[in-house]
């Protein structure tokens, strides 16, 4: 078997479809986000980053950086083991307490990423609860889909953000059947928000457990940064709230929060938690500082929303088609994989704007887009430059404008 040829042919397929991923080589500079240096062809160029998930710029917060330095100097680089075998520091325990408090839950459990927290938790629950049925929103993230698949539990997919469809499916099963409803609050590619209250009402009617991924909402919504469920006063009705420390909190890691029993169960049975080195103490200390800051400061959230409003209104005024949604994500629809990649490349090479093109399989074919994530740190002149550059390229590509 010529394995190399087989793999190369698959890669070739990606090239032909225009969806081969090329990573931009970006050097972030603490203190100047969203401005960064791009390395390409042996040259360095300034770019403005418009597609970061460090939504609030907390990755360069002086408080976060100071906490990380202090922990690094105090404890060294790595955790030195799994949580069970020497890797459980005092900071890990404090961070879990802080996360439980953030979501109004009894307990929390840390993982090395949001991906692992979804995969390990859904995988473990689905495999451990006899005859478990998992109801998954059709737009759920790959980490949830993989966790559910790994569990080998029966899965039913309900229409995206449609509680009626969820109810229709649940009516096929009796009350004795154990059920988990898995969904997200903010969907990261379309930026739409789940009708959480209605979904919870359906879940309660059918006696189902609920699993809510707030990865794109924690830090950003709610008076303390607890996410959409906090903003809507619903946290106590959700069984498990999952989040990341790598996006709005600006560091790295993932977590779940829930009852003491649920967290203890995952801690005790999830292989993706048990058999993996704990997060480094410096990462944990940085996340702790970030969460604590965002619990008491609304400045970043207010400025973030203000920048989102400005970007949307500027793009609308020049007819650049953005998907309307109630969140902080501004998807600019190109709907052509080749043009989408071309615009992304030209923005980077000629306009100094880094806006990663999003193609299939991250989004369905025909809905290729540029996903803009404004931050509290983008200035009016950054917004002007972005809007003018997109306007130029829209004309060059003969792409349709949206009539306001
Ligand atoms: N859940 C959702 C909805 C996501 O979009 C992502 C990542 O983008 C994850 C989970 C994984 O989180 P992390 O980046 O911390 O692994």
Image (cartoon, rainbow, N blue to C red):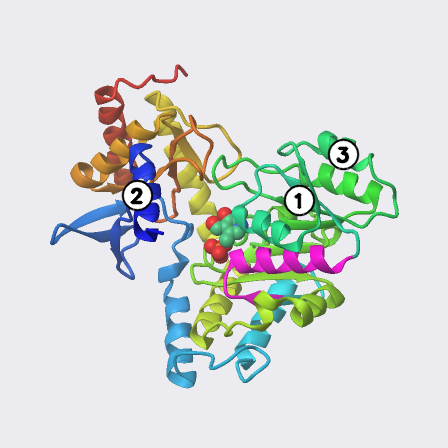
Q: Judge by depth and name the residue closer to the eye, 218 or 211.
A: 211
Q: What element carries label 1?
A: loop
For the residues labelled 3 and 2, the Cα–Cα distance comes to 47 Å
Q: Which of the two discs, 3 and 1, labels the residue nearer the N terminus?
A: 3
Q: Is mark 2 on a helix, strand or loop?
A: loop
Q: Quadrant of residue 106?
A: bottom right
Q: Which of marks 1 and 2 is in front?
A: 1
Q: In this view, does 123 lie to the left or right of 246?
A: right
Indicate the position of residue 84 as horizontal and vertical percent values: 60, 80
**Image quarter of the C terminus:** top left
Residue 128 among those drawn in magenta: yes
Location of residue 259 with respect to 54 vertically, above or below: below
Q: Mark 3 points at which residue?
A: 169
Q: Name the residue under label 2.
A: 379
Q: Nearer the viewer, mark 3 or mark 2?
A: 3
Q: Judge by depth and name the residue closer to the eye, 85 or 202.
A: 85
- What is the span of residues highlighted in magenta in the rendered image? 109-129
At 30% from the left and 54% from the top, the residue drawn is 33
Residue 220: tell me if it is visible: no
């Amino acid at each position: 078997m010529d394995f190399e040829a087989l793999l190369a042919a698959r890669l070739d397929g990606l090239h032909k479809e225009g969806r081969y991923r090329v990573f931009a080589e970006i050097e972030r500079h603490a203190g100047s986000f969203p401005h960064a240096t791009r390395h390409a062809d042996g040259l360095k160029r300034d770019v403005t980053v418009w597609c970061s998930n460090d939504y609030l710029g907390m990755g360069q917060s002086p408080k976060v950086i100071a906490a990380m330095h202090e922990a690094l100097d105090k404890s060294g680089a790595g955790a030195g083991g799994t949580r069970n075998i020497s890797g459980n520091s005092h900071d890990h325990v404090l961070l879990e307490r802080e996360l439980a408090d953030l979501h109004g839950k009894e307990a929390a459990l840390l993982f090395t990423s949001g991906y692992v927290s979804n995969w390990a938790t859904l995988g473990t629950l689905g495999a451990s609860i006899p005859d478990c049925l998992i109801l998954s929103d059709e737009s759920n993230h790959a980490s949830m889909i993989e966790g559910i698949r790994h569990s080998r539990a029966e899965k039913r997919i309900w229409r995206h953000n449609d509680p009626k469809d969820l109810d229709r499916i649940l009516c096929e099963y009796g009350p004795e059947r154990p059920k988990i409803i898995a969904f997200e609050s903010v969907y990261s590619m379309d930026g739409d928000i789940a009708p959480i209250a209605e979904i919870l009402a359906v879940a309660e009617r059918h006696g189902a457990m609920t699993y809510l991924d707030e990865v794109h909402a924690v830090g950003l919504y709610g008076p303390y940064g607890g996410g959409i469920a906090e903003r809507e006063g619903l946290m106590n009705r959700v069984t498990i709230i999952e989040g990341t420390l790598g996006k709005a909190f600006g560091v790295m890691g993932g977590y779940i929060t829930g009852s003491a029993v649920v967290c203890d169960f995952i801690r005790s049975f999830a292989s993706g938690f048990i058999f993996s080195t704990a997060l480094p103490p410096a990462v944990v200390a940085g996340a702790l500082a970030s969460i604590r800051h965002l619990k008491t400061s609304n400045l970043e959230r207010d400025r973030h929303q203000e920048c989102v409003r400005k970007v949307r209104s500027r793009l609308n005024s020049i007819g650049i088609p953005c998907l309307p949604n109630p969140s902080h994500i501004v998807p600019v629809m190109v709907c052509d994989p080749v043009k989408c990649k071309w615009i992304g490349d030209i923005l980077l090479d000629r306009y100094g704007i880094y806006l990663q093109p999003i193609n299939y399989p991250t989004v369905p074919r025909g809905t290729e887009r540029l996903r803009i994530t404004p931050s509290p740190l983008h200035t009016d002149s950054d917004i002007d430059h972005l809007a003018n550059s997109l306007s130029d390229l829209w004309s060059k590509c003969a792409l349709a404008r949206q009539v306001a």
